[in-house]
Structures are given as C-alpha cells and as structure tokens.
Amino acid sequence: MGTYIKAFLDYLNYEKGLSANTRTAYRRDLEKLQHFLQENYSVSEPEDITREHILAFLSWQLDQGAEHSSMARSVSSIRAFYRFLFLEGYTKKNPTLNIDTPKIKRKLPVVLSIEEVDKLMEAPKVTTPLGIRDRAMLELLYGTGIRVSELLDLQLDDINTTAGFLRCIGKGRKERILPVNQTSIFWIQNYLAKSRNFLAKHPLERKLFLNARGSRMSRQGFFKILANYAGKAQLNKEVTPHTIRHSFATHLLENGADLRTVQELLGHADISTTQIYTHLTKTHLREVFQMYHPRA
C-alpha cells in the first residue's frame, strides 16, 4: 500500500499542486489507515480493503478520542486516495462510496477586537532588528489576511511597496494579487532598510522574512513568536496566525465590505467558507445591542 500512497502524494504534488502541509495531512491519514489494517486484519493491498475495514478504522479512531473533525478529514483523505486509484486503474472498486462523512459542529473562530489588535502590533520591541521584523510580519498578516504559509513563502520580488500590492501563492498554487495598506508598507520598508541585511547570511537568499540564522522562518518559529507577543500584550485569548486572519475578515465585514470581496482577499474557493464571518458579525451586533439598548 505504501507504493500507492507515494504515487498518490506525487499526483497531489505535481498534478494538483497542493502544498506540502496538505500533502503531509493526506500522508498521515493514509499511513494511519495502513498501519491499522496491517496490525488488525493483515491487509496491505488497496483492492482488498472493504467498507467494513474503513468503518472499523473510523470506529477505532473514535475509541482513541479523535475529534469528529479529524475523522471527517480521514474520510476525505481516503476518498481522494481511492478516487485516484480508480482513475489510474489501480483498483476496480471504491469502498468509500457509501460512507458518510461525520458531521462537524463548526465553532465560531476566535477574533481579536481592534483594541486587542493594536496591543498585539505594539508588543514587538522595534528598537531591535528582530523586533522590526516581527512588527512588519504582524502588520502584513493583519493588513492583508494572508495565511501564515503564504506569509513565510513571500519572496523579495513579491511585494511592491511603491505600488502598494503583493503577490502570494495560495492553496492549489493559485496566485492572488492583494492590496497592502500604508501601515504595513511603512513597517516593511523599515524592515528592509534596517533589519533584513542584518539577518541575511547569504546574498542570494530571496525569502522576504528571515529567521535569526538568516534562513526561511518555519511555521513553528512564527507560532512561538506570535505566542510570545500575545502574552506580552496580555491577550486572554488563544492567538494563532488564523486568529489574525479571522480578525482581518471580520473587521472588514463589520466596516461594510461585501462578502465577495472578502472571499477574493482570503483566497477562498467557495463563498460558503467565507460566510462563517457573517455569523461573527451578527454575534458582534447582538452583543452591542444587548449592551447598549435600554430594552435589550
């Protein structure tokens, strides 16, 4: 089965253009299924896997305390795998056809208030090269709503501070051109003038944001930086890069932006993904109403 999984991952990479993080999630789900079937049923060929085997795997995950969201992703991974196998002629059956995806109770994402965003932006110590870099990263993340992977993949040539736009490559290798606000441009220019040359160890390095060793910053590295500043700002919320993205979208809608524009800025393929932010704005309106209306 390992050979088929590798072929599937190559297909996702070279033909579908999916990101390394997405491919890693698929690989993890399929290898987990592979190990479960080998240990419990001595099954290793995709042709021998039945609907009952997959249901047993899902039941085992549930017993292990897996969230419904994790199980839904597993079903999605296995479905995509078998769709690939069927189309490529590796198998003549698809045991996932009559398996329902577990229903996920969607939680409203955590959103920062504008005051909390201001506190977070002011947390870096901008008298140091790393502090200037961090302020530029935070401003750009909130100012454009890009994903953390898109932020860390930015090249020097991807941002035009004169024209006020950047180019980023999102999911499925889709390109977006996004406007950049003046505050973000100010801090990017500061970073380029005062910090990047200090951090860069190799003259040919083209990544925009560099770590203290002069190479591309990792997602884990950025998560640690963000958690540190959230603590300094005394934000009593779980703050992740996606929290900032959610805040960007919610604040746009609260200030009158239309849903289609926000969808385009976020790079959502389906507007239903963007619609969760309308629930957030309705929740905010309800809270304001209950706080200030004399008969609420």
Image: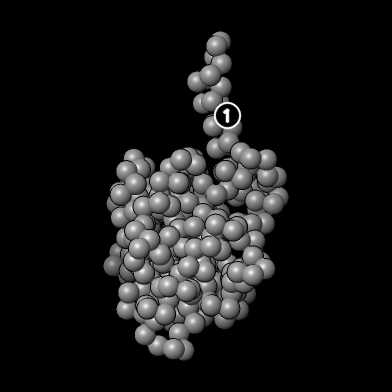
> Residue 117: image x %, image y %?
45, 46
Q: Nearer the viewer, residue 153 or 74?
A: 153
Q: Nearer the viewer, residue 132 or 228?
A: 132
- Split into 4 quadrants, where in the image is the C terminus? top right
In this view, which residue lies farthest toward the top?
A: 295
Asked if residue 65 is positioned above or below residue 236 in the image, the reply reads: below
What residue appears at the point 60 percent right and 57 percent down from the top-left corner?
181
Quarter occupied by residue 191:
bottom left
Amino acid type at circle 1 is Leu
Left or right: 110 as drawn, with respect to 235: right
* Render colour scheme: one colour
> Residue 80: image x %, image y %?
55, 66
Secondary structure, mark 1, is helix
> Residue 267: image x %, image y %?
62, 60
Q: Nearer the viewer, residue 229 or 45?
A: 229
What residue appears at the point 62 percent right and 72 percent down from the top-left corner?
160
Left or right: 168 as drawn, with respect to 291: right
Quarter occupied by residue 214:
bottom left
Q: Circle 1 sits on which residue?
A: 285
What residue appears at the point 40 percent right and 51 percent down from the top-left corner?
122
- Split into 4 quadrants, where in the image is the N terminus? bottom left
Q: In this orientation, does residue 281 appear?
A: yes
Please rate how many residues cluster around mark 1, counting C-alpha atoms within 10 Å: few if below 14, some from 14 to 19, many from 20.
few
